[in-house]
Image (tube, helix red, strand yellow):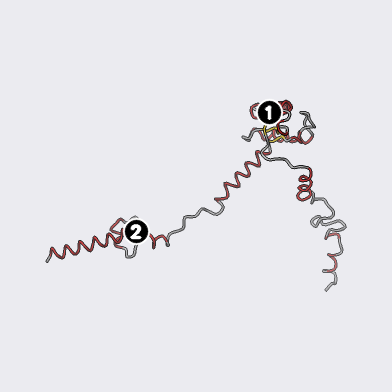
Amino acid sequence: MTAQRYKKTRYATAALLMATLAGGCCGRSCGLGGCLAIPHCNMANHSRNMVPQVYPLGSVVRSHFHTEQTNAEATDFVFNLVHFTGETAHLTPDGKDHLMEVAARMRSSPFPVLIERTPNNANPTLDAERRVVVARYLADLGNPDSDQRTIVAVPYDRGLNSFEGEADYYSNFNFRGNSNNFGNGGGATGFGGSGLGNGFGGGFY
């Protein structure tokens, strides 16, 4: 009788073990015996009570923003064709200002100084002359590694043509100091200089 009862107990324990393994353990560090002691303990039920594995807010797009910022800083070290006078290696006034900015930031930035080559590499001699001129100026301004870091290549992005530049100027830069805008507080057509501000507070009601 004792042997039969022991056999039934062993079969019941084996059945419980198989059912637990089939349903999955709860994942706690309680050992197999602890999981067997918890009723209805399986991975499906336990996962619903766990904190979801999600990234912090903004961490996914942060790397993309950092890449955009790095690329934008790299374009600050590009000398475009408009920085040179005609088909020469002489810098324009804007090109000289750009040269001073590059020289000031070059020691603390890893980016190369890029000289935009002529369209379709039409004049490589002129491109090489421009590279030498810019590198020498940068060296005179305290950058001894300028000759190694100054290269001739296609710019990272194409420049704007005259029509695109005009549209960009009027949409982004020409809104200050214009008497026909809403934010200057004056002018013939600004809200601050018109009679619209007097009616509402001066007896309109």
Report helix, strand or loop for mark 2: loop
The circle drawn on residue 24 is 2
Q: CA distance from mark 2 to mark 1?
A: 68 Å
**For marks 2 and 1 on the same chain, the one whose residue lies earlier in the sequence:** 2
The spot of residue 147 in percent (x, y) is: 66, 26
* Of labels 2 and 1, the one closer to you: 2
The spot of residue 150 in percent (x, y) is: 67, 29
Q: Image point 68% across, 30% down: which residue?
A: 152
**Foreground of the two, 183 or 175:** 175
The quadrant the C terminus occupies is: bottom right
Kind of residue sitting beneath label 2: Gly
- Could you tell me if residue 140 is visible in this image? no
Q: Image point 76% across, 42% down: which residue?
A: 161
- In the displayed structure, 108 sits above or below 64; it is above
The quadrant the N terminus occupies is: bottom left
The circle drawn on residue 142 is 1
The circle drawn on residue 111 is none
Quarter of the figure with residue 103: top right
The spot of residue 170 in percent (x, y) is: 79, 49
